[in-house]
Image (cartoon, rainbow, N blue to C red):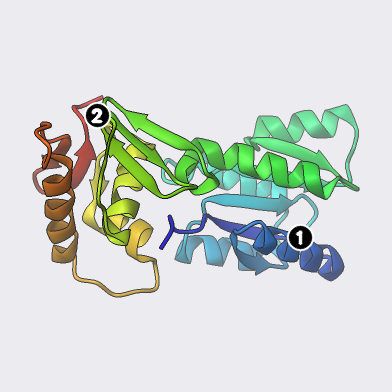
Amino acid sequence: MAVERPSVLLVEDEPAQREVLAYNLSAEGFEVRQADNGEEALLMLREELPDLLLLDWMLPNVSGIEICRRLKSRPDTSALPIIMLSARSEEVDRVRGLETGADDYMVKPYSLAELMARVRTQLRRVRPASVGMVLSHEDISLDGETHLATRAGKPLKLGPIEFRLLATLMEKPGRVWSRDQLLDRVWGRNIYVDTRTVDVHVGRLRKVLTGQGGGNPIRTVRGVGYALGSEP
């Protein structure tokens, strides 16, 4: 099993464009959810945050620019990567979109190849292992594409859960992940697993990481969860 596929919420009210985009995103290996209006998008965002938001400017009910403004003003969603899609090509519109908080802005009609490249660029910031990047922390290295992990140059024999767990921790060294967050990222948002299962697999991961004489790189934060390495 590979690293969990990065998720994209596609918000586009034109059915033909939405279908083409969804097909291409799926073909690139992304998990795609879709909405065709602003209210539906906000509801879906409350239920489950994606790794990236592809957002059309002109939407029924609530505009894309208003959705962007709301998300970027909230601490829990301010870091969500947003790519704005718009037929508005004037410089003033691009500036407004970016100043509202969009991380990127693409004018219709756009190149699908360029859009996919920009999606991958944004995902490298938040889910680097999921787009095939090699991660490293001190003497630990993890390749999300070849599914290989090493410590001090020696291969680590990790099960699929431990591999995804290590990938998640290595994407943001120093960040404290709660057990619920790790459950969502490693096991999947739609699978019920007891939070104690996280502790069991962290224990297994620690055993593998320290099995060849290295120190324990995973920090337990009492009452919260786990982090890789010391405090940032």
* Mark 1 surroundings: few (<14), some (14-19) or many (≥20) residues within 10 A: some
Please give the residue where the numbered disc 1 appears in the rendered image. Answer: 21
Image position, residue 117 (x, y; %): 71, 41
Residue 18 as seen in the image, left or right of residue 100: right
Q: Amino acid at mark 1?
A: Leu
Dividing the picture into quarters, in which one does residue 29 lie?
bottom right
Residue 170 in view, yes or no? yes
Of the residues under marks 2 and 1, which one precedes in the sequence? 1
The residue shown at (13%, 57%) is 199
Q: Are marks 2 and 1 in contact (CB under 8 Å)?
A: no
Mark 2 vs mark 1: in front: 2
* 3D distance between C-alphas at marks 2 and 1: 42 Å
The residue shown at (79%, 46%) is 113
Q: Which quadrant is the C terminus positioned in?
A: top left
Image position, residue 124 (x, y; %): 54, 38
Residue 114 numbered tag: none
Residue 228 as seen in the image, left or right of residue 189: left
Name the secondary structure under disc 1.
helix
Residue 124 as seen in the image, left or right of residue 224: right
Please give the residue where the numbered disc 2 appears in the rendered image. Answer: 152
Dividing the picture into quarters, in which one does residue 182 lie?
bottom left
Image position, residue 209 (x, y; %): 17, 41
Residue 13 in view, yes or no? no
The residue shown at (57%, 49%) is 52
The residue shown at (76%, 60%) is 21
Q: Amino acid at mark 2?
A: Ala
Image position, residue 87 (x, y; %): 89, 46
